[in-house]
Amino acid sequence: MSGPRKQPAIGAVLAGTGALCLGFYFTFAAVQGDSGVFRRVQATAEKEALQAERDRLKAEVARMENLTHRLSDTYLDLDLLDERARNVLGLVRADEIVIH
């Protein structure tokens, strides 16, 4: 005959199951939580997109500052003034042909 069977204590089974569940929970939180790996990748991509937008806006501001300076009282670019007047007011000289 065989000897008496030893069954694991119910407390040890519950402790092991609890530890396993906690491990799964913390692993899930580390990957998909508010501060997880996926959120970090998303934040990095958003940061790069915002930096590109910032650089584009800086270039646009620099272009507008250049145009403003060229039309200021201290420095007047007559070619730019002529171009802007034609564009905004729709002016055309008598010797010019307009093609639409």
Image (cartoon, grey):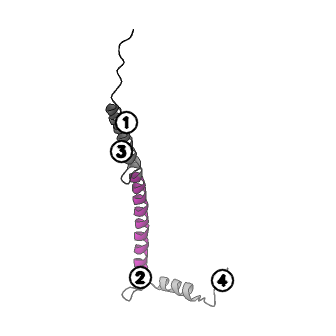
- What's under tag 2, amino acid-wise? Thr
In reply to whether residue 51 is colored magenta, the answer given is yes
Residue identified by numbered label 3: 26
* Mark positioned earlier in the residue sequence (2 or 4): 2
Q: Is residue 7 above or below residue 18?
A: above
Residue identified by numbered label 4: 98
Secondary structure under badge 1? helix
Secondary structure under badge 2? helix
- In this rendering, the label closer to the viewer, 1 or 4: 1
- In this rendering, the label closer to the viewer, 1 or 3: 1
Secondary structure under badge 4? loop
- What's under tag 3, amino acid-wise? Phe
Q: Residues within 10 Å of mark 1 (few under 14, many from 20)?
A: few
Residue identified by numbered label 2: 68
Say which of 47 and 89 sits in front: 47
Q: Is residue 78 above or below residue 46?
A: below
Magenta residues (range): 39-67
Cα distance, mark 1 to mark 2?
A: 71 Å
Cα distance, mark 3 to mark 2?
A: 57 Å
Residue drawn at 40 percent across, 65 percent down: 55
* Mark positioned earlier in the residue sequence (1 or 3): 1
Residue identified by numbered label 1: 17
**Residue 51, picture quadrant:** bottom left
Q: Residues within 10 Å of mark 4 (few under 14, many from 20)?
A: few
Q: Looking at the picture, how far across and down is residue 31, in whole percent?
A: 40, 46
The answer to whether the residue labelled 2 contacts the one labelled 4, judged by CB atoms less than 8 Å apart, is no
Residue drawn at 53 percent across, 87 percent down: 85
Say which of 15 and 27 sits in front: 15
Q: Looking at the picture, how far across and down is residue 36, in whole percent?
A: 37, 50
Cα distance, mark 3 to mark 4?
A: 71 Å
Q: Residues within 10 Å of mark 2 (few under 14, many from 20)?
A: few
